[in-house]
Image (cartoon, coloured by chain):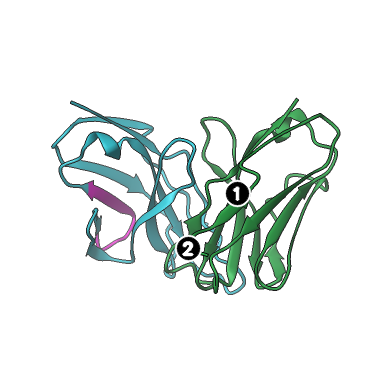
Chain colours: A green, B cyan
Amino acid sequence: GAGVSQSPSNKVTEKGKDVELRCDPISGHTALYWYRQSLGQGLEFLIYFQGNSAPDKSGLPSDRFSAERTGGSVSTLTIQRTQQEDSAVYLCASSLEVTGYYGYTFGSGTRLTVV
Amino acid sequence: LAKTTQPISMDSYEGQEVNITCSHNNIATNDYITWYQQFPSQGPRFIIQGYKTKVTNEVASLFIPADRKSSTLSLPRVSLSDTAVYYCLVGGYTGTASKLTFGTGTRLQVTL
């Protein structure tokens, strides 16, 4: 597609429920990244994919968080047993190649609210 | 990963040139410097990237001194629509990942 697409744009869920956030990167971009941004804060790195593999999962805050990427394209970030502190905007980005030299293209994010 | 330090906020009047400086004292040899702009409710948008000296594109210039321990983003003749948060990032390919770390950014407020 023309840009990075994320869905849903907004998600309200009850504490303890599982949620899935989807990212559709730019066609042909081999690298895909997930970040989290809490209100008024900077971006927090979560996980990075090169193709379908995730060489760097160091940013995932707990084992309730997982992500996968299939076909070198769409990625899903899953949060199990959501907690109120998981409320944030989850941003996905993709880049043409693994060096990131040409910069990231970000989606508009999914605003997750856990009530 | 090199840590960056930039002012929390800046104010400017429309039509002025704005320079935002970022410090990155422990930048590594293979690190490049990238600036992003973020509007409310949107993801960050790539502005400019450089390794050394000066880079210019249609929206901004990036000045990097010889020691590369700092960089300055220059926005010529800002308008109200340039009000946003600007992030300075330093990073590079480590062989297995290209993980750029975002700080809290500089909040630029442009007024009439």
Residue, disc 2? A2
Q: Which x, y percent locates residue A40?
A: 51, 30
Q: Which x, y percent locates residue A3?
A: 49, 59
| In the image, residue A111 lies in the stretch drawn in magenta | no
For the residue pair A44 and B91, the one nearer the viewer reads as A44
Q: Which x, y percent locates residue B89?
A: 43, 53
Pointer 1 chain? A
The amino acid on which the numbered mark 1 sits, given as a three-letter code, is Tyr
Q: Circle 2 — which element?
A: loop
The local crowd at label 1, few if under 14, some if 14 to 19, many if 20 or more residues have their Cα within 10 Å, is many
Magenta segment boundaries in residue numbering: B65-74
Residue B52 versus residue A66 in the image, above or below = below
Pointer 2 chain? A
Residue, disc 1? A35
Q: Earlier in the sequence, mark 1 or mark 2?
A: 2
Q: Residue at x 22, y 43 (%)?
A: B19
Q: Circle 1 — which element?
A: strand
Q: Is residue A24 left or right of residue A3?
A: right
Asked whether disc 1 touches disc 2, contact meaning CB atoms under 8 Å apart, the reply is no
For the residue pair A24 and A102, the one nearer the viewer reads as A24
For the residue pair B81 and A82, the one nearer the viewer reads as B81
Q: Residue at x 29, y 61 (%)?
A: B67
Q: Residue at x 60, y 63 (%)?
A: A32
Q: Quadrant of the C terminus of chain B?
A: top left
